[in-house]
Image (cartoon, rainbow, N blue to C red):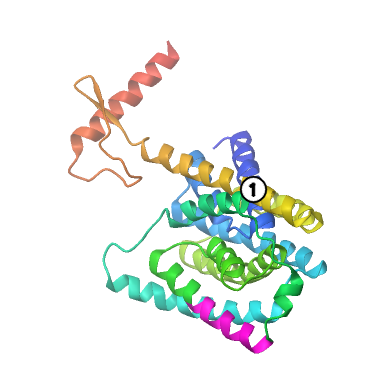
Amino acid sequence: MSILLTVIVTFFAGMGAGLGTGFAGMSAAAVISPMLITFLGMDPYMAVGIALSSDVLASAVSAYTYGKNKNLDIKNGLIMMVTVLLFTIVGSYVSSLVPSTTMGNFSVFMTFLLGIKFILRPIMTTKEAMAQVSAKKRAIQSVICGVMIGFICGFIGAGGGMMMLLILTSVLGYELKTAVGTSVFIMTFTALTGAVSHFAIGGTPDWTVWILCVVFTFLWARIAAVFANKATPKTLNRATGVILVMLGVAVMAFRCWDRVTNVCWSDGSLKILCITTQTIPENDISCEMERKKLIDNKLEDTIS
């Protein structure tokens, strides 16, 4: 693996993930994982572990920045965090009992659509409007929404960053800065739990990739969070919307690219035999032989 390629890939992965986290509380796994898998050929399970560990510091520094600017609801954030963690487990268990329930592209499409929403219909709720809701009612709402987010994320296998932002702004009536601040506060702990479990099961990561992803994501998240807290609500909505749309399109492009790379030649024509990222079936010997021939031909052309 080329060091230069590693630096380039991790830089842009960290930039996308950091901007998404700092501006919108988006999980770094949505950006970092597909880039590490597509361009560095990393094992998907390990790529998710690196992405989640990058999320920890990025979310923590973002939460600190939002909290410093009084844009963080710690009390209700803690309530929601506990219920999200508990009901993610419940949702995962129920999902295991029902076949074909996973929706891998759910969070990607939600990222894209939420970005469009922020551009066309910005969130202009004020803190004064938030203060009109009683503490008891807000706590009950946090429990209910935490249950919904945790169960749905566990059931369909999607990340909760975008769903938390959607629920906080559309259902609980949070203004955008407080919604993002509370979301990244919750994600600090959920990402830590996920990262520890991934490395405990999958072993230690590639430390070079891990360090670069963590550092780049941290730096860009800090930059995004500082800008977001200084921006006006209208500017922040537009900037957040543009970032989410761009990230949504980029991640979908990475996944499409990854899906069409599993191809082989047969009878002089290009046939897409393995349209998913799964490996070729063991009994599909002809496709494997043709793929090896294609690689050998490319190498010969390169040498000549």
Question: Closer to the camera, 150 or 114?
Answer: 114
Q: Viewed as shown, does residue 55 lie left or right of 154?
A: right
Q: Is residue 199 visible in this depiction of the protein?
A: yes
Q: Which quadrant is home to the C terminus?
A: top left
Q: Is residue 41 visible in this depiction of the protein?
A: no
| x and y, in percent, of residue 185 in the image | 67, 70
Q: Is residue 221 magenta?
A: no
| x and y, in percent, of residue 2 in the image | 58, 35
| x and y, in percent, of residue 127 in the image | 75, 71
Considering only vertical position in the picture, is 186 above or below 233?
below
Q: Viewed as shown, does residue 300 lie left or right of 265?
A: right
Q: Viewed as shown, does residue 30 lie left or right of 259?
A: right
- The local crowd at label 1, few if under 14, some if 14 to 19, many if 20 or more residues have their Cα within 10 Å, is many
User: From which residue to which does the magenta span run?
Assistant: 135-147
Q: Residue furthest bottom?
A: 136
Dominant secondary-structure state across the stretch colored magenta: helix
Q: What residue does disc 1 label?
A: 14
Q: Quadrant of residue 136?
A: bottom right
